[in-house]
Image: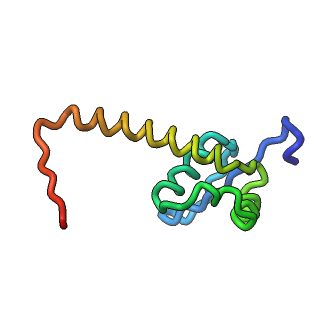
Amino acid sequence: MGSKKTQKVLAVEFKEADSGFTVSNFTYDRSRVRELASHMILYNEYPFSLIEYVIFNKFMSAITPYWEKMSRAAAKNECMKTYETEKIKLKALLKLVNKAHITTDM
């Protein structure tokens, strides 16, 4: 099924609010998956080599057959992209702030 480009994959979602289902076309966004993997690594302070672990790749392959393995260098590059993107967002947010108070707990 994955090799046939004309065949669509359906995504079925259950909505608890009205106990109904929605069906839509599923599109795999490789760049979004890589971005979220970098967020996972950064948030949990995992090593870049997590991406190369056998069990992690088995887990990701079970979730989606479209998963492509990444190297630790690729994971590092994705994390650096994420860092730069978030830094730009933070600078834009802080431009609106006139004053900031910073406290530390020693």
Q: Is 95 drawn above or below residue 36 in the view shown?
A: above
Left or right position of 13 against 89 = right
Residue drawn where x is 45% and y is 42% of the image: 83
- Give the side of residue 30 with respect to residue 45, left or right: right
Q: Does residue 20 appear to the left or right of 6 in the view shown?
A: left
Nearer to the camera, 60 or 18: 60
What colour scheme was applied to this rendering of the protein?
rainbow
Is 12 located above or below residue 7 in the figure?
A: below
Number of callouts: 0
Residue 2: image location, x then y, percent: 85, 46
Q: Nearer the viewer, residue 30 or 28?
A: 30
Relative vertical location of residue 59 with respect to residue 66 in this rendering, above or below: below
Q: Quadrant of the C terminus?
A: bottom left
Q: Judge from the rendering whether residue 60 lies leftward or rightward of residue 95; answer left or right.
A: right
Identified at 64% across, 45% down, the residue is 73
Q: What residue is shown at x 35% (from left), y 37% (from top)?
A: 89
Tell which residue pokes out farthest to the front in this image.
Answer: 106
Image position, residue 63 (x, y; %) = 71, 60
Q: In which quarter of the view is residue 92 placed?
A: top left
Q: Of 47 and 11, which appears nearest the observer?
A: 47
Where is residue 49? Give x, y as percent. Answer: 64, 57
Q: Going 64% across and 43% down the picture, which residue do you hit?
A: 74
Residue 46 at x, y percent in the picture: 54, 61
